[in-house]
Image: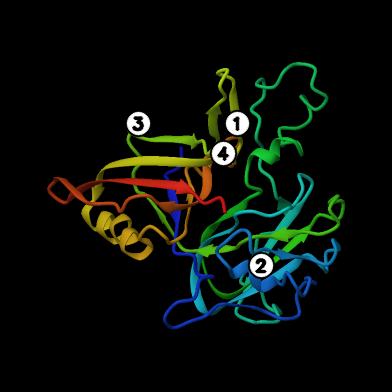
Amino acid sequence: MANVIMGYPNLVNPTALYTPTILPGFGNFLPTLPAAHILDRYYGIHARTAGITEADTQFAIDLGVVRTIRLVAIPDSSVSTKGEVRVVASNDPAFGTLIYDGGWEDYWTDLWPYGTRPWGMPDILTSKKPSAEDVTRYPKQWFKILPSHVNARYWLFYFRDTENPDGFLDFSRAMITPVWEASVNPVYGDTAIGWVSRTRVRRGPSGAKYFNRKPGHRTASMAFDFLPQDEAFANPFEMGRMLDLDGEAFLVFDKDETIHLGRWSFHCNLTSLPEGRFTGPGLVSTTIEIEEIRG
């Protein structure tokens, strides 16, 4: 198992010194739903392309200054289960010289371990990808951990989804972040990932239940023991100061996991601020508690 990764802060957000922008000349978006909406933190304020050609479905972000990046993500979109994505980075706004090129890859990761789907399903032997029905239960997210940190100012996202039945692509958000990769794994027995239901349940006079179904969200609690003191206070402790309860992060629980990677990774806020508990000379324990952002 690879160690937990937390991507933060989201550098597409404005800071006291720099305001990221969408570079002109990339993609084709509706005037009423422009690419600039990708920089808005609320999913409901989304961007929509005017078509689904490769020329239509791309956008580029200027971070305002060279930044050190290792995670890029699209927390939610309308990219179909056949869609592909490619991300490149440069310090040239025309992307004439690339510092990083991730190449084309599937937007969706695998979802179903072999042997867990009922025998007789048409694609049981040919695909572990989610179906169009499956993905209605999850945010349509994509993310990538870069092999190493990349120092770049401009980031260009390409999408290839020319069979999308909607005839357009929606994008709700982008994340471009450095990361903290914990030096030790979280403690077994004190670490959990789960779902929280938002469905409202009421009973009628007869006792029958009536449901108002709402999308749930994931939560995680990760306990770390015996982190080196410098790591604990320079990373989770500082993450609490930087993010508070409103800042964005992205959890990648195990980057080497091939099937459950999408289940165990999500766009999130802290639900409490990590504290450092001194467990020995130069050693600190802490707990990170987060919940998924779904709107």
Q: Which residue is mark 1?
A: 211
Where disc 3 sits, the SS reads loop
- Could you tell me which residue is drawn at 57 percent across and 54 percent down? 295
- Could you tell me which residue is drawn at 31 percent across and 40 percent down? 223
- Could you tell me which residue is drawn at 75 percent across and 75 percent down? 26
Residue type indicated by callout 4: Arg
* Above or below, comparing residue 130 to residue 141 in the picture: above
Q: Which residue is mark 4?
A: 263
Question: CA–CA distance between discs 4 and 2?
Answer: 25 Å
- Could you tell me which residue is drawn at 63 percent across and 42 percent down? 138
Q: In the image, is 256 to the left or to the right of 24? A: left
Q: Which residue is mark 2?
A: 88
Residue type indicated by callout 2: Val
Q: Tell me which label, 1 or 3, sits earlier in the chain.
A: 3
The mark lying in front, picked from 1 and 2, is 1
Q: Tell me which label, 1 or 4, sits earlier in the chain.
A: 1
The mark lying in front, picked from 1 and 4, is 1
Is residue 199 at all visible to an observer of this figure?
yes
Residue type indicated by callout 1: Phe
Count of numbered labels shown in the rendering: 4
Q: Residues within 10 Å of mark 4 (few under 14, many from 20)?
A: some
Front one among 107 and 290: 290
Q: Residues within 10 Å of mark 1 (few under 14, many from 20)?
A: few
**Residue farthest front in this picture:** 205
Q: In the image, is 135 to the left or to the right of 261? A: right
